Image (cartoon, grey):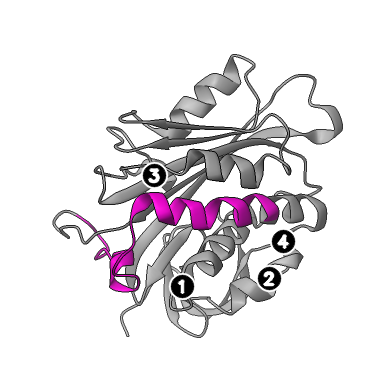
Amino acid sequence: MRWPAEAIWEAVAPLLPGFTVEVLPQLDSTNTELMRRARTGRADPVLLVAEQQTAGRGRLGRDWHSSAGASLTFSLGLPLAPADWSGLSLAVGASVADSLHPDIVLKWPNDLWLGDRKLGGILIETASFGDGAAGARYAVIGIGLNIAPRPAAGLSIEPAALRELLPQADAAAVLERIARPLVGDLQRFERDGFVAFQQRFAQRDALRGRAVRLSDGTAGTAQGVNAAGSLLVHTAAGPQAISSSEVSVRPAAR
């Protein structure tokens, strides 16, 4: 596969001085690699792509399996200093979905869905660097997308594939569609916070109005997200605002 590294660099470099693009045939995890680099003081903006990941990671330590050509796995690392980090994964999800297709919905806090099937996931990690001036940290935004159909065996949620929406999609072209808008949206998030993305997320909210069950067993009805990106759930005990660090949410059976 021919990757559009130069075209992506030309589109993004004016926004991120020092930006580079790297494509590797195989890696344990693009997020893991960029976090390793950050811990050694390497905090330059970079887009790192792995054609295949051998130890990809999702939220809460879950595995994310990928294979060359059938999936797109990459991480974008860059210094970021928002006043409030809340809602960053939701903003990233809105950016990616808006770049790809109107039918993609977002499952709070970090998944892209097609219907009730998982199309992709987002994993965000941060590391301190330098003297931490102005509250900046090195943010690593990892994204995995299913390009071609994959077996559902062993998965808790049935997988979806981007080729169901875009039959000619390939990983290289999808990356080119995502990269420049994502960088621009991250800079907007840094400047304006999640409130600038709240409506974009709401238009794709897969849980709003649905019965959900929280990981602690609490049941309720999802009622969207607030300006901080917390999930609003109406429960028998009253309304709750749930942050991504507290629970995992699955929609209850319809």
Chain-order first, disc 2 or disc 1: 1
Is the Cβ of the residue at disc 4 closer than 8 Å to that at disc 2? yes
What is the residue that sits farthest to the right in this orientation? 134
Point out the frontmost of discs 4 and 3.
Answer: 3
Is 130 drawn above or below residue 126 in the view shown?
above
Q: Front-most of 99 and 36?
A: 99
Q: CA distance from mark 4 to mark 2?
A: 6 Å
Mark 1 sits on what residue?
101
Type of the residue with mark 1: His
Q: CA distance from mark 2 to mark 1?
A: 18 Å
Mark 4 sits on what residue?
194
Mark 2 sits on what residue?
198
Q: Is residue 177 magenta?
A: yes
Specify the quadrant that holds the C terminus: bottom left
The x, y position of residue 96, in whole percent, is 52, 60
Specify the quadrant that holds the N terminus: top left
Residue 73's label in the rendered image is: 3
Is 232 drawn above or below residue 69 in the view shown?
below
Type of the residue with mark 3: Thr
Q: Is residue 170 left or right of residue 211?
A: left
Asked which quadrant contains residue 13, the reply is: top right
Is 133 drawn above or below residue 224 in the view shown?
above
What residue span does the magenta drawing correspond to? 155-184
Q: Front-most of 117 and 167?
A: 167
Q: CA distance from mark 2 to mark 3?
A: 26 Å
Q: Front-most of 106 and 13?
A: 13
Chain-order first, disc 4 or disc 1: 1
Point out the frontmost of discs 2 and 1.
Answer: 1
Q: Residue at x 35, y 42 (%)?
A: 2
Query: Circle 2 — which element?
Result: helix
